Amino acid sequence: MQTLFSKALSRVLLAFILSFGLFAGGTSQAPVSTPSSVESSGYPLELQDDLGTTLVIPSKPESIISLSLFSDEVLMSILEPHIFAAVSTLSQSETYSNVAQKAQEIEPVIEFSVETVVGLYPDLVIAANWSEADKIAQVRQAGIPVFQIDTPFTLEGIREGITTLGELTGEATGAQELISEMDVRITQLEAIIQTIPPSERVRALDYNSWGSANGQDTTWDLILSMAGIINAAGELEAGDYGQVPLSKEVLVTLDPDILFLPSYIWGEDNGAAAFYDQVLGDPALQGMKAIQQRRAIIFPENLKGTYSHFIVDAAETAARSAYPEYF
């Protein structure tokens, strides 16, 4: 394995070669490609991330740090554990991560600390599009390529993100296999949903402890759609992050067939159970169908919040909850 010094020296030499090419010939001699042509172009690879920043990856990454839960879930499904130089705390969370068991086999566990990341000196860092810009800049200044990846909200966006990660890491085949598996399961779920008469389709919404639900253009809305469930909050105006504020009066007026409630409330170990009891016992809500028919359902946070290929697991779970007789 390369030492940190030799890795850094390699990066400096590569930068010099690229710079020399630019000044001597007017254009860089390094191959320029997009993620879709990585396998045919090989490395060194020059490309733009999802925020438009150009970066150079000298060779197929042998050590990676993922700092996005989307990339955590995708990469841990297609890469061997030894490829990860470190994993994030969130990736090991049984509450929020769908790859927690795999992530728990990897050390060290880190937060996004510039000093820690630079000290580990991976070949590639993958970060979310919303990551702190100053931290990203400092890691790049240390000579470490950082690819910022978008947070997808559609199935096509998920497919594109998986494709990008696979080709970025030299594992395009594994990525396409993951997409194929996802699409097969989507087709199977669609076939079941199509057998459910429109008259039996249910309306549902997720209701959280701060009094809101997910509206249109959210991954939760996508999950419900895949599950053949109508989002009762889907036609209401949404605010930040797709959230629709819900007073108890509006909640009663919407009167969904199912209430999906949180399985975890941040900072409160028993908060989800307490909130469940609070909703079921609230006098103002006793006339709702979901309360009367005991269809207030605690939904796992790792599935509710996923925006990777595990969205199929979320849709299947929601569909089984809504239409158990069809499964």
Image (cartoon, grey):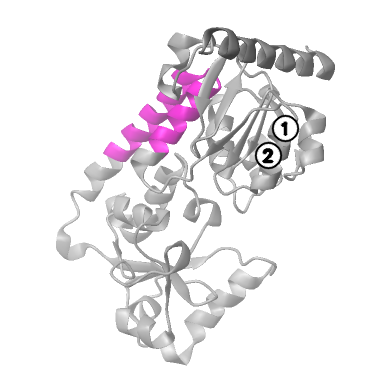
Q: Nearer the viewer, residue 126 or 256?
A: 126
Q: Nearer the viewer, residue 103 or 18?
A: 18
Q: Is residue 302 above or below residue 88?
A: below
Q: CA distance from mark 2 to mark 1?
A: 6 Å
| Residue at the image point whose x is 53% and y is 20% from the top | 46
Q: Which residue is mark 1?
A: 141
Q: Is residue 160 magenta?
A: yes
Q: Nearer the viewer, residue 246 or 20?
A: 20
Give residue 96's position: percent from left, percent from top: 59, 52
The quadrant in which residue 199 appears is: bottom left
Q: SS class of the residue under badge 2?
A: helix
Task: State left or right for residue 95 relative to residue 182.
Answer: right
Q: Is residue 174 above or below residue 162?
A: above
Q: Label for residue 137? A: 2
Give residue 307's position: percent from left, percent from top: 47, 46
Instruction: Judge whether residue 86 can be spotted in this image.
Output: no
Q: Amino acid at mark 1?
A: Gln
Task: State left or right for residue 135 relative to residue 274.
Answer: right
Q: Are marks 2 and 1 in contact (CB under 8 Å)?
A: yes
Q: Is residue 170 magenta?
A: yes
Give residue 93's position: percent from left, percent from top: 66, 49
| Residue at the image point whose x is 31% and y is 50% from the top | 226
Task: State left or right for residue 122 relative to residue 233.
Answer: right
Q: SS class of the residue under badge 1?
A: helix
> Magenta segment range?
158-187
